[in-house]
Amino acid sequence: MGSFGNFGNGGRKRWRDGEMRGESMGGEERRKTNIKAKQRARELKEKVKMILMAPVKKPSQKLDLIQDIQRLGVSHHFENEIEELLQQIHNSSHDSTEPGDQETDNELYTAALRFRLLRQQDIFNNFKDSDGKFKESLVNDVALTFTTTHLESATHRLSPILSKQVTHAMYQPFWKGFPRLETRHYLSLYQERDSQKETLLNFAKLDFNLLQQVHQRELSEISRWWKDLDFVNTLPFARDIVVVVESYFWASGVHS
């Protein structure tokens, strides 16, 4: 799979002259290429679905895969499958009676991942005391200053890829990030991982490019509409087209 698109820094100048119009509209050759890309995306989607639904030894393996799918920006293709799997994992965690069946809940990373994916407060019961409060030692561990200090000191001991991920998370937490930019960043990290699934990576790249083409076509129409209305001359107080494009950019992020 080749390279994937990027929200470059030169976007403002390019949009002032509507240069993206020629790039996004294309001709017959571009249309044929786009049809092939969509067909390839459908094929890869089915393969990723098979990977997602395949049995695994530990629930944590499935949780890791679901997290990768979400962070790669393609979870909307598998909403029903992910909901079904998370429900199964949640049900099994409550139905299990053997101590060994719950061992993954005692690992903070897995418990935190389960908490984020399942949104179930009782996942953290193993870390509470008899009064229902978090254990004092855990409270200290999750304090922001403690976490930040120890993560910063640990970055040089981590693998290069994990170090990049930790550094980025401290600078820009995932939940505060712009969805498509976070997807772009995670794609660059995921393709460097030894444990990456090539089929998932290729699908995520292709899906990213196809969606970016949609954004380019929509922005081309917005640019044409703005120029045809000639707001700059008829309404002196009107803002530059760049502001309109930026508004589209942020609106897309809100609804991603």
Image: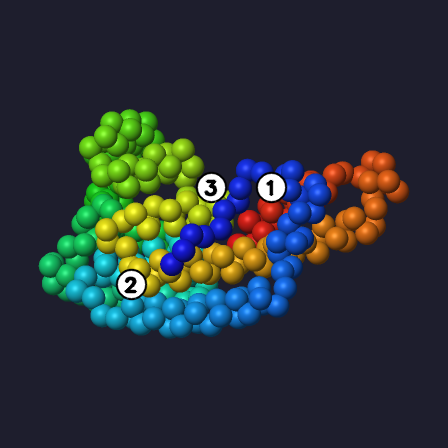
Amino acid type indicated by mark 3: Lys
Amino acid type indicated by mark 1: Gly
Give the residue at x 35% y 58%: 201
Can residue 140 be seen from the camera position used here? no
Q: In the image, is residue 150 above or below residue 177?
A: above
Q: Which residue is mark 2?
A: 90
Q: Disc 2 to disc 1, how far (Cα)?
A: 44 Å
The location of residue 37, given as percent across then percent down, is: 48, 67
Residue in front for this viewpoint, 98 or 169: 169
Q: Earlier in the sequence, mark 2 or mark 1?
A: 1
Crowd class of label 1 (few under 14; some 14 to 19; many from 20; radius 10 Å): some
Can residue 55 be seen from the camera position used here? yes
- Answer with left or right where residue 66 lies relative to residue 77: left
Q: Which residue is mark 3?
A: 176
Amino acid type indicated by mark 2: His
Give the residue at x 66% y 47%: 19
Crowd class of label 3 (few under 14; some 14 to 19; many from 20; radius 10 Å): few
Cβ–Cβ under 8 Å for marks 2 and 1: no
Q: Element under label 1?
A: helix
Residue in front for this viewpoint, 20 or 170: 20
Q: Which residue is mark 1?
A: 11
Label 3 or label 1, whichever lies nearer to me, is 1
Q: Earlier in the sequence, mark 3 or mark 1?
A: 1
Q: Disc 3 to disc 2, how far (Cα)?
A: 26 Å
The location of residue 125, given as percent across then percent down, is: 25, 50
Q: Disc 3 to disc 1, how far (Cα)?
A: 23 Å
Q: Element under label 3?
A: helix
Q: Element under label 2?
A: helix
